[in-house]
Image (spheres, helix red, strand yellow):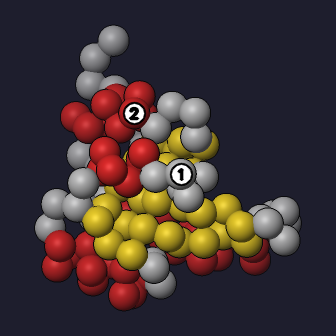
Amino acid sequence: MPALNVAIIGYGFMGRAHSNAYCQVGRFFPTPFEIRRKVVCGRNWAAAEELARAWGWDEIAQDWQQVVARRDIDLTDIAAPNALHGPIALAAAGKLILCEKPLAASA
């Protein structure tokens, strides 16, 4: 089964909810991928580290721009504060993107 390497930007409530979903998805839906929780990214290292430890993320990072630029990341999950959704989604263009609503703060 091919791997799908996921990066999540954000470690708050939605970061936790999405982490749970990545752990459970194979129990609900057949998937052709092995979901790998590769890196959690956020400004607060301790909070990101707590999420990583609780939900099995491999790595922690603080710079979302470096994370979305990584060649080993297949899917960028944007669970950051609303004002960052648009810039992160644009920077991650070309990869799979999951984004919490709203997609952007303005048109």
Q: From this viewpoint, which residue is outermost toward the top? A: 107
Q: Quadrant of the N terminus?
A: bottom right
Q: From this viewpoint, which residue is outermost toward the front? A: 71
Residue 95 rendering spot, x and y as whole percentages: 58, 40
Q: Which structural element holds mark 2?
A: helix
The crowding category of the residue bearing disc 2, from other C-alpha atoms within 10 Å (few below 14, some 14 to 19, many at least 20), is some
Residue 86 rendering spot, x and y as whole percentages: 34, 29
For the point 39% across and 33% down, the residue is 91
Q: How many marks?
A: 2
Q: Is 90 above or below relative to 23? A: above
For the point 46% across and 38% down, the residue is 92
For the point 75% across and 77% down, the residue is 27
Q: Nearer the viewer, mark 2 or mark 1?
A: 1
Q: Which structural element holds mark 1?
A: loop
The answer to whether one can see residue 22 in this image is: yes
| Residue 91: mark | 2
Would residue 70 be found to the left or right of residue 82 on screen?
A: right
Residue named by callout 1: 71
Q: Nearer the viewer, residue 10 or 27?
A: 10
Tell me where residue 48 sits by quadrant: bottom left
Q: Which amino acid does label 1 sit on?
A: Arg
- How far is disc 2 from disc 1 in space, using C-alphas? 13 Å
Residue 94 rendering spot, x and y as whole percentages: 58, 33
Circle nearer the N terminus (2, 1): 1
Would residue 105 be found to the left or right of residue 7 on screen?
A: left
Q: What residue type is labelled 2?
A: Ala
The crowding category of the residue bearing disc 1, from other C-alpha atoms within 10 Å (few below 14, some 14 to 19, many at least 20), is few
For the point 64% across and 76% down, the residue is 24
Would residue 45 be found to the left or right of residue 103 on screen?
A: left
